[in-house]
Amino acid sequence: MMVSAISLLVFLFGLIIGSFLNVAIYRYRTGYTLRGRSQCLICGKTLRWFELIPLASFIIQGGKCRACGGRISWQYPLVELATALALWGIYRQSLFTHNNLWLLILDAVIWVLLIAITTYDLRHKIIPDEWVYTFAGLAMIRLVVSGADWKWGFIAGVILFGFFGGLWLISKGKWMGFGDAKFALGIGFFLGLEPALSAMMFAFWSGALVGLAIIAIERFQFSARLAGVPARRAVLGREIPFAPFLTLGIALVYFAQLHVVPLFIS
Ligand SMILES: [Zn+2]
């Protein structure tokens, strides 16, 4: 009973953090600070307090601005929900792992960063240096604090960085951005060698699936156009950001403890 009440509080706290995170992602490098009232991006109306309740406002308003009826981006409720689920997941996990408070706080900050990096990469197809270096730095601190054999985590980061850096170098940045290499460095520090490799496999598999789906949809649209059916709109850009797949891989390893690499070794 007590535990579920704390779970709920952690989840609600996550929603609020997610709401701030949306503002931070949106205003990053725009010259706006985190202060100042939120406005509708279409009509500019200053939003009232009841239009700023995480998740709830979006659902009640049907994803539309109350003043102009303009569509509100799905990014807002999704980032709020993802942050809430992440913090809740970290809390739930701590009940079994009995990690100390510092480790919990580090994990929470790391996951908030991961969600920010993923969302920013989806929007702008670039990973901000400050965020990805902060992630790698915090992951390094976590590695030392956790009391695990930090040498392996360190080696994991270097190996993954080398692998992604190699892909970036060989393809002259076509297959992989250099931002992905910096991201991989932190992933190695954060998870350690075997779990990080499992996360990479999930990332490449899910990335390949989505890539194939996009090619299939484009083919379909192309043949529809040949048949005289007007294409409604282009599906997606050619460049698919990779950070979301990497984060999905990290989540599968970190929260669901899914590991694929041991299957290949044993
Ligand atoms: Zn509006």
Image (cartoon, rainbow, N blue to C red):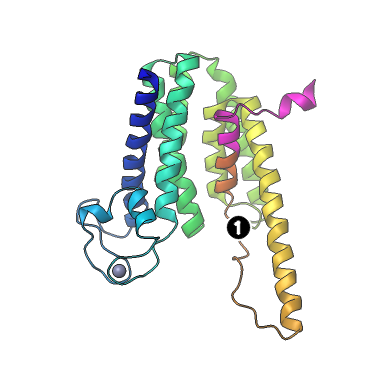
Whether label 1 lies within 8 Å of ligand 1 gets the answer no
Q: Nearer the viewer, residue 140 or 83?
A: 83
* Residue 16 falls left or right of residue 196: left
In percent of width and height, residue 229 lies at: 69, 83
Callout 1 secondary element: loop
- Residue found 43% across the figure and 43% down from its top: 81
Q: Which residues are magenta?
A: 249-266
Q: Evaluate whether residue 92 shows in this view.
A: yes
In percent of width and height, residue 1 lies at: 38, 19
Question: Which residue type does callout 1 highlight?
Answer: Ile
Q: Evaluate whether residue 146 shows in this view.
A: no
Kindly indicate the quadrant of the structure image that contains residue 198.
top right
Q: Look at the image and tell me in which quarter the C terminus lies.
A: top right
Residue 242, placed above or below residue 253: below
- Per the picture, the main secondary structure of the magenta-coloured stretch is helix
Q: Nearer the viewer, residue 76 or 144?
A: 76
* Residue 115 falls left or right of residue 28: right
* Residue 219 falls left or right of residue 52: right
Residue 239, placed above or below residue 228: above
**Would you name the residue on which mark 1 appears?**
240
